[in-house]
């Protein structure tokens, strides 16, 4: 499972040499290295397992063991997996399944990550309960939405397969067998797996993300190997040869100069869910008060190439210079897709297309958009992988996680808490208690 | 088809009285009325049909006639509709289909709005060509991606149904029968419908959006009636009683005070695609240079309730005060969803949920998030409809369109052009010409 680095990160267009005054100077990025010494030490402790950390997950073989054990049980006994969870409990799994899933042997891996009643009803309608395993995930065990999801589908399940069979169709993940979800698991006699002691948004490299991925046919061992490789790259290098330190510090500096919107724009639709996962990681980890009470944070936003050239590009080029861009590509896209027939090539707008594959057109659109962003002074970088495979995705996941803690360190915020959302949870319970079948005024 | 106004717009929390210094003063919004006099006059000419305009579309009965004629032909003869188009050529139809579609009699209405080779291949795999109508839309007729989509699927279609039958399975929409797409339509002997003389992002109330909607079972007459009703509301009222002038002016003023990120957050997943459609409308219409060469524009971003409370809310509350929020709800959500059983109510975290419907939980989350945004000084407004029906969606579409031109007027930019994206199209052709089966360096 050794492999050369698969991810290539090209930051040229972040710098002033390429994009002028909207860029940053390489020497200024380099100079931030001193402020990262403390983080570097903490990361060494994380790697050594002296403190629990996302960075250590790819070096803990028990996660893959759990995934193989339960994954084989699920794929052998069932044809559908329904994952219940909010935020970090579902976004990592969704990313793995959408990027790399597609098992010939297993049916659908479905996610319910909201309490939208219509969406839930539509999802349940498509289920064959006798063929379905439910995986309910909540780190605290007390996430209201996840409990509501499980409790409302339980009667459907019991009617379909009988109350005594529920224990064979339900698997629960919480930390330390805690909270209401674990209590429910015990009451229903279902197995309870352990959530690692890291926040939900950093949990994808544990069974939280890997188990749904495995069931969907993802090479989870490859994902973990790629993540481990990137973790080592981020532990051994100084600034320029440490991809996450170099990338994180540059993004921080761009944000300090007013480019505090981070646009993730993959040119490959399978990479779309990376944006949804990253968006939570970045927003919840960075958007908070620093020690002086200043409102800090970078705002993430998803786009998709080439579609959003017809939606957002005008704004990106001529709107406020408040954005920085990360473009993702997989070289393999060039080889995909039919060739456009030459038969109508006498029509002027068809002539440039004739003979090229759809993948070549998409690649040309990427190159053109990158160049027009650069010409218009919009700082952008490219993360490029030869093919979208498990190893490359694992590298990407770890890169983005370490970059997040690097930016947090420079902003002076704690990347692992989310103190502001507690108030809303209390208010939700209060409003719910008052609710009597209508919304009120 | 007369109906009372269905959309209620509550702007209380945009103002300083509710959110303190991050809000705007009602008197300042009122004072912007003078700068909108010119737009008001232009809108009167638009309403009278003296200049082509999106505002006049709901008063042009020929669009519904075309939709009924071709819609009935499609639903009678086919079971699937495949729409090809980029940006404004597909986003309006996608919005109608997702919000209100779901015909018992017709199968899927599918959209290809990218040139992602894997996505195209997966979509084509699911098609039964003999049962499929293809609708290819491009205002100019020369959109490279739409041409590439049509040209690559043509051989598949011809192999499946025979070259002579293609003309019965293909419908084309362009303006003035122009461009390569119309030439292709003529060469293939397929019917060619007319794109109205408005930009793609303002075209949803013509066959561009209404025809896919009708085929999917949407009450398109209701949508048009709602839009007409809102157009009249926006033509007759002064500032406070003109929803789009009042709303647009307040959003402009918030942006001038640094809140230039517009977050659209529906609490009802069916409304999700409204965000995708709005995002193009807002970005392409507003993101551009004003007469003095300043970079202007507000950046749109989509969120979804309650899911993004577990992803973005921390940033919204404690991150930079650079955002304004529009929350959408449909009261009817309260009535949907199973009641959460009381059976496990002895578990502390379950107790508050027991006996409530999933829809009530979602509604309580909306109320709680609105309150916590307000308490934290984050300007927000609520657009509320009793139920998500055609009339209400029509009102919403027209409201957002008129608000867009109001904000453009105040920013001093032209809401109907997109001058910056031309360079990328030229560069795409250049890169494509150089492409020989690999991406290059």
Image (cartoon, coloured by chain):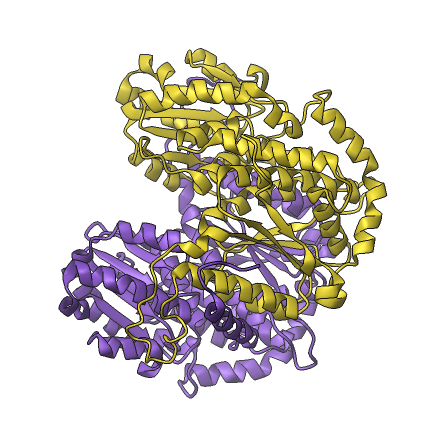
Chain colours: A purple, B yellow
Q: Where is residue A68 in the image (x, y as percent from the top left)?
A: 22, 68
Tell me the quarter of the picture where residue B327 sits.
bottom right
Q: How many marks?
A: 0
- Residue B9 located left or right of residue A191: right
Q: Where is residue B230 in the image (x, y as percent from the top left)?
A: 63, 37
Q: Is residue A383 visible?
A: yes
Taking the spot 20% from the left edge, 65% from the top edge, the residue there is A169
Tell me the quarter of the picture where residue B396 sits.
top right
Tell me the quarter of the picture where residue A32 sits.
bottom right
Q: Where is residue A70 in the image (x, y as percent from the top left)?
A: 21, 69
Q: Which of B245 and B123 is in front in this view?
A: B245
Q: Is residue A220 visible?
A: no
Say if B404 sits above or below A145 in the image: above
Q: Nearer the viewer, residue A165 or A394?
A: A165
Taking the spot 82% from the left edge, 44% from the top edge, the residue there is B33
Taking the spot 42% from the left edge, 14% from the top edge, the residue there is B190
- Residue B423 located left or right of residue A56: right
- Residue B150 located left or right of residue B157: right
- Residue B206 located left or right of residue B11: left
Say if A60 sits above or below A168 in the image: below
Say if A289 sits above or below B53 in the image: below
Residue that protrudes farthest toward the bottom in the picture = A50
Q: Where is residue B179 in the image (x, y as percent from the top left)?
A: 56, 19
């Amino acid at each position: 499972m050794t492999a050369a680095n698969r991810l290539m990160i090209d930051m040229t267009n972040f710098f002033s040499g390429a994009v002028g005054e909207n860029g940053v100077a390489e020497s200024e990025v380099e100079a931030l290295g001193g402020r990262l010494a403390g983080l570097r030490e903490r990361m060494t402790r994380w790697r050594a397992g002296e403190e629990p950390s996302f960075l250590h997950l790819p070096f803990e073989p028990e996660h893959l063991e759990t995934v193989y054990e339960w994954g084989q049980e699920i794929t052998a006994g069932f044809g559908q997996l329904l994952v219940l969870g909010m935020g970090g409990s579902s976004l990592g799994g969704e990313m793995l399944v959408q990027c790399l899933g597609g098992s010939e042997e297993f049916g659908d891996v479905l996610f319910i990550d909201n309490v939208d009643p219509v969406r839930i009803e539509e999802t349940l309608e498509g289920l064959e309960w006798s063929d379905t395993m439910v995986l309910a995930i909540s780190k605290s065990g007390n996430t209201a939405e996840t409990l509501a999801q499980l409790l409302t589908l339980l009667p459907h399940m019991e009617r379909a397969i009988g109350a005594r069979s529920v224990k064979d169709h339900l698997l629960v993940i919480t930390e330390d067998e805690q909270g209401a979800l674990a209590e429910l698991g015990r009451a229903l006699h279902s197995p309870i797996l352990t959530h690692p002691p890291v926040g939900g948004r950093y949990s994808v490299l544990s069974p939280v993300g890997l188990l749904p991925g495995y069931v969907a046919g993802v090479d989870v061992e490859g994902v973990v190997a790629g993540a481990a490789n990137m973790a080592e790259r981020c532990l051994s290098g100084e600034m320029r040869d440490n991809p996450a330190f170099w990338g994180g510090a540059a993004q921080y500096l761009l944000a300090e100069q007013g480019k505090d919107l981070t646009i993730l724009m993959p040119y490959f639709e399978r990479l779309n869910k990376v944006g949804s996962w990253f968006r939570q990681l970045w927003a919840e980890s960075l958007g908070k008060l620093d020690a002086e009470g200043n409102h800090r944070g970078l705002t993430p936003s998803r786009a998709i190439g080439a579609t959003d050239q017809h939606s957002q590009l005008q704004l990106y080029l001529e709107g406020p210079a408040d954005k920085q861009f990360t473009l993702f590509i997989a070289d393999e896209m060039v080889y995909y897709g039919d060739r456009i027939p030459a038969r109508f090539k006498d029509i002027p707008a068809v002539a440039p297309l004739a003979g090229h594959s759809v993948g070549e057109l998409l690649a040309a659109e990427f190159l053109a958009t990158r160049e027009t962003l650069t010409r218009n002074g919009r700082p952008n970088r490219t993360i490029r992988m030869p093919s979208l495979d498990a190893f490359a995705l694992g590298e990407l996941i770890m890169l983005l996680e370490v970059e997040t803690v690097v930016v947090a360190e420079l902003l002076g915020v704690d990347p692992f808490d989310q103190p502001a959302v507690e108030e809303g949870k209390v208010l939700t319970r209060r409003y719910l208690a008052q609710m009597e079948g209508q919304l009120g005024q």
